[in-house]
Image (cartoon, helix red, strand yellow):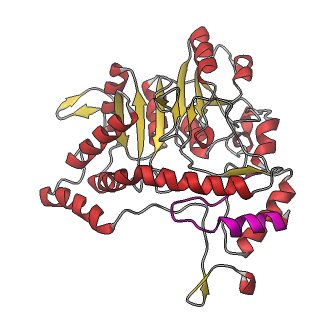
């Protein structure tokens, strides 16, 4: 970095990351955690976990909600609970966990290309990918932008397919007045430390089906309740330490999203218009402002900008890169997804998190590097 770095601290250089974990006041976290400490009950559906589940269920206005250990295992649980064992139509533009969950459960991912506006799965190309072995559609609400939900539901109903939404980015987003997590047979969410709402590590699985919820509940805890065993399961429980973090962060959700909204508006006002952004044409969509992705005209332009930012101590992220159909573990699918391949090379997420006040500096570096 050297003398040109705009971020220095105590004579040394620091890095501004693309995001920063929101930490509530430490005393508030430890005050909540003390309740579990005093009972010496740290896991197995403790008081704090049950309280967090209820708060989030109410906040999201969903009927059935399970707090689990992370955002990947809930995808695996969804596939298992829906008895998916063959082909799953999915998106190549997502985090690798979406594809890995399919592979880990012994299923075959069938990649369908993405839309150029939202970067979500292109619903007009789904039917052409359906075969006699297709059992489900697993789509991602990219950056919290909704997939074409009604179209996907029509296709699923016509072909008797299950629908799973990877809604890791969609906490706090609404579509037609409902939580974006309240669609599909199952929706999953991530509460990783980098997310807009977090529990350090964590995830959730949401469904409207009571029987499916009961099955997922058993899956979460080895397939048994007390001395009653119902079948196979896995350890997807989360701890009181993680639930305490969620309970401490929860009261600040509105402020977290408002600060992100203000930063987004600053970027929108300052960045040149030839840098496009993924966007939804849906008028009944409410954003959570979790990410600020920009699309460059070429990969070389993106790389040049990344290098300029890094030289000044700013770590932007290629999110998502590479297109998932090009991973070593998925090349056997021989998929053709030119839109995803193109955008994955040209999308860069800029820093955005509560307390981030360097929008002008970031924008100036971006403009100077192009």
Q: Is residue 169 left or right of residue 306?
A: left
Quadrant for the C terminus in the image: bottom right
Expressed as whole percent of the image width and height from the top left, the position of residue 252 reads 39, 54
Q: Residue at x 29, y 55 (%)?
A: 244
Magenta stretch: residue 364 in it? yes
* Range drawn in magenta: 347-368
Which residue reaches farthest left?
Answer: 39
Q: Residue at x 25, y 42 (%)?
A: 50
Up the image or down, 252 lies above or below 112; here it is below
Which image quadrant for residue 363?
Answer: bottom right
Which image quadrant for residue 137?
Answer: top right
Which image quadrant for residue 148?
Answer: top right
Q: Nearer the viewer, residue 175 or 163?
A: 175
Q: Is residue 138 left or right of residue 36?
A: right
Q: Residue at x 29, y 62 (%)?
A: 29
Expressed as whole percent of the image width and height from the top left, the position of residue 203 reads 42, 44
Q: Nearer the viewer, residue 28 or 254?
A: 254
Task: Examine the rendering and report whether any part of residue 132 can be seen.
Answer: yes
Q: How many marks?
A: 0
Expressed as whole percent of the image width and height from the top left, the position of residue 224 reads 25, 32
Magenta stretch: residue 151 in it? no
Up the image or down, 314 lies above or below 91; here it is below
């Amino acid at each position: 970095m050297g003398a040109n770095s705009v971020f220095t601290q105590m004579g040394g250089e620091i890095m501004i990351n693309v995001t920063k974990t929101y930490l509530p006041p430490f005393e508030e976290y430890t005050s909540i955690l003390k309740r579990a400490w005093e009972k010496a009950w740290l896991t197995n559906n403790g008081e704090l976990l049950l309280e967090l589940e209820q708060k989030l269920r109410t906040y999201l206005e969903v009927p059935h909600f399970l707090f689990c250990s992370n955002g990947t295992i809930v995808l695996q649980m969804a596939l298992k609970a829906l008895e998916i064992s063959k082909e799953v139509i999915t998106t190549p533009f997502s985090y690798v966990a979406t594809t890995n969950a399919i592979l880990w459960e012994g299923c075959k991912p069938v990649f369908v290309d993405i839309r150029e506006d939202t970067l979500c799965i292109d619903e007009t190309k789904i039917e052409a990918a359906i075969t006699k072995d297709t059992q489900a559609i697993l789509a991602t609400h990219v950056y919290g932008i909704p997939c074409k939900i009604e179209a996907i539901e029509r296709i699923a109903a016509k072909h008797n397919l299950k629908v799973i939404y990877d809604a890791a980015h969609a906490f706090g987003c609404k579509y037609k007045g409902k939580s974006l997590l309240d669609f599909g047979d199952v929706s999953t969410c991530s509460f990783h430390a980098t997310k807009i709402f977090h529990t350090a590590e964590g995830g959730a699985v949401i469904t409207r089906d009571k029987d499916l919820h009961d099955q997922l509940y058993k899956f979460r805890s080895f397939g048994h309740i007390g001395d009653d065993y119902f079948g196979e399961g896995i350890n997807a429980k989360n701890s009181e330490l993680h639930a305490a973090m969620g309970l401490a962060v929860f009261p600040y959700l509105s402020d977290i999203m408002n600060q992100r909204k203000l930063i987004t508006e600053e970027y929108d006002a300052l960045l040149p218009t030839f840098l496009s952004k993924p966007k939804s044409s849906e008028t009944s969509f409410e954003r959570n402002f979790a990410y600020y992705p920009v699309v460059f005209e070429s990969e070389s332009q993106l790389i040049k900008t990344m290098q300029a930012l890094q030289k000044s101590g700013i770590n932007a992220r290629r999110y998502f890169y590479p297109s998932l159909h090009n991973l070593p573990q998925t090349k056997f699918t021989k998929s053709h997804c030119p839109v995803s391949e193109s955008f994955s090379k040209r999308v860069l997420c800029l820093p955005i998190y509560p307390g981030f006040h360097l929008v002008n500096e970031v924008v100036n570096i971006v403009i100077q590097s192009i």
